[in-house]
Amino acid sequence: MAEAKAIAPLEFEKPLVEFEKRLDELRGLTGKQKIEAGTEITSLEKKLEEARRDIYGKLSPWQRVQIVRHPQRPYLLDYLRLGATEVVELGGDRAFGDDHALIGGFAMIGPQKVVFLGHQKGRDTKENLMRNFGCAHPEGYRKALRLMRLADRFGLPIVSFIDTPGAFPGVPSEERHIAEAIAVNLREMFNLRVPIIAVVIGEGGSGGALGIGVADRVLMLENAYYSVISPEGCASILWKDRAFAPQAAEALRISAGDLLDLKLVDEIVPEPEGGAHRDWETTVKACVEKVSRHLAELSHLSPEKLIAGRQDRYRKIGSVQEH
């Protein structure tokens, strides 16, 4: 299991690694040596705890982007394995082919049967090539639309898990009309008669995220980001240099706290200290609990109220009030 492997530290976590290395050395002492080192062990443990609080309590938007891109972070299939039952994946858009970067099907989340959708990244080079690094082609969004219409027909709630740097921008995508595929999804999701919950579990990049992101409730993991463009892309445009990505991440206000303040997301799902990659089970459990609660709340609304509320929600985004 990937969560059992040693956690690769990020650049800003390296001071913590030094503390942990020294503590391991002292704890490895035996007999009288260990007794004599007891005071130093206690002191180092206190310093390590203070350093953790200082680092993880004041994470910058760019540091959160680094956390959310950690290669050991749980992906959609991990959420399904740990937090869902009766999972049945369905494939194909019935027009061109099957996209492995955007998957979907049926599952039980808590007591509720749902149609799930979401982006899936790979763990190694071979799987990343197969999953196209989580960047879906047009057929991925058309597959998602087919499954959403299936959910609408059978009265099943839809839960989408967003984790993509963006839709695939290559020539094949343009040839098969990626912009049209995403635009149709946006239009159709506004009129689906079933509850829709979107959860940003990792990267929420541009139209690639929005293509399955129109929802009655939008949840977001604590270290996830949701943005019209990646920090590197923004830096390349505004500063002509990707090295300004940290400043771009700050200016874009892409982190969960900022988006909650802007009322673009409804609730933040807490992550374990250091990020979701440090404790998959705790992260998935917290996510499932919040999704189940929101599903229960939405289940009491009529289709007409769901549609009206969803449309009203997005009309309010970007509104300006003059004094």
Image: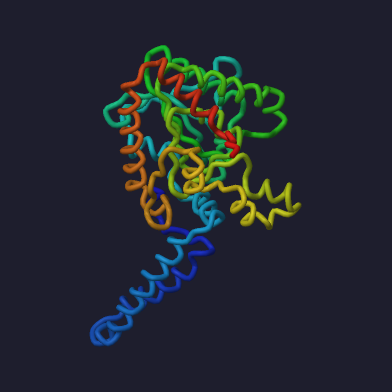
- The residue nearer to you, when weighing 291 against 109, is 291
Residue occupying image coordinates x 43% and y 32% = 217
The quarter of the rendered structure image containing the C terminus is top right
Q: Residue furthest top?
A: 153
The quarter of the picture where residue 317 lies is top right
Measured along the vertical axis of the image, is residue 284 above or below residue 242? Answer: above
Does residue 230 sit above or below 143 in this rendering? below
Say left or right for 53 vs 124: left
Residue appearing at x 32%, y 42% in the figure = 285
**Percent x, y for residue 212?**
52, 28
Left/right of residue 262 with respect to residue 155 in the rendered view: right
Query: Which percent across, then down, holds residue 195?
Result: 40, 23
Residue 208 lies in quadrant: top right
Task: Give residue 53's position: percent from left, percent from top.
Answer: 40, 65
Nearer the observer, 299 or 242? 299
Q: Could you say which quadrant of the image residue 306 lies in?
A: top left
Q: Residue furthest right?
A: 240
